Amino acid sequence: MSFIALFFFVAGALLLIGGFKKNNRALLTFAACFWLASGTCSDLARGFIDGWGSTAQSVSLAAVR
């Protein structure tokens, strides 16, 4: 688990606890968003890097032609 995913997971847990104690729906919503981000951040980063690399390759190939 990367540090960013771990940060999002811990932040989501803290917001979840705070949201339950204060009965605050906004904190609970943010906790859900942080937990969603903690599960998908590595896949998102990998897809972004792969997409960025393939765009650079296709642009360089188009310049050669």
Image (cartoon, rainbow, N blue to C red):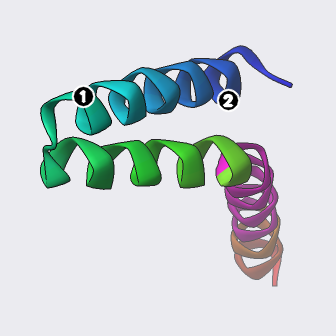
Residue 19 percent across, percent down from the top left: 25, 36
Residue that badge 1 annotates? 21
Q: In whole angstroms, how far apart are the C-alphas of marks 2 and 1?
A: 24 Å
Q: Residues within 10 Å of mark 2 (few under 14, many from 20)?
A: some
Residue 20 percent across, percent down from the top left: 30, 37
Residue 4 vs 54, above or below: the answer is above
Q: Nearer the viewer, residue 59 or 17?
A: 17
Residue 64 percent across, percent down from the top left: 81, 73
Residue at 30% across, 48% down? 28
Between label 2 and label 1, give the one nearer the viewer. 1
Residue that badge 2 annotates? 5
The numbered mark at residue 32 is none
Residue 28 vs 21, above or below: the answer is below
Residue 48 vs 16, above or below: the answer is below
Asked if residue 43 lies left or right of residue 11, the reply is right
Magenta range: 41-56
Q: Nearer the viewer, residue 32 or 42?
A: 32
Q: Secondary structure at mark 2?
A: helix
Q: Quadrant of the C terminus?
A: bottom right
Asked if residue 1 lies left or right of residue 13, the reply is right
Residue at 76% across, 44% down? 42
Q: Quadrant of the N terminus?
A: top right
Which quarter of the picture shows residue 62?
bottom right
Q: Nearer the viewer, residue 28 or 40?
A: 28
Chief secondary structure of the magenta span? helix
Q: Which amino acid is tagged 1?
A: Lys
Q: Residues within 10 Å of mark 1 (few under 14, many from 20)?
A: few
Q: Is residue 51 magenta?
A: yes
Q: Secondary structure at mark 1?
A: helix
Residue at 56% across, 45% down? 35
Asked if residue 7 lies left or right of residue 28, the reply is right
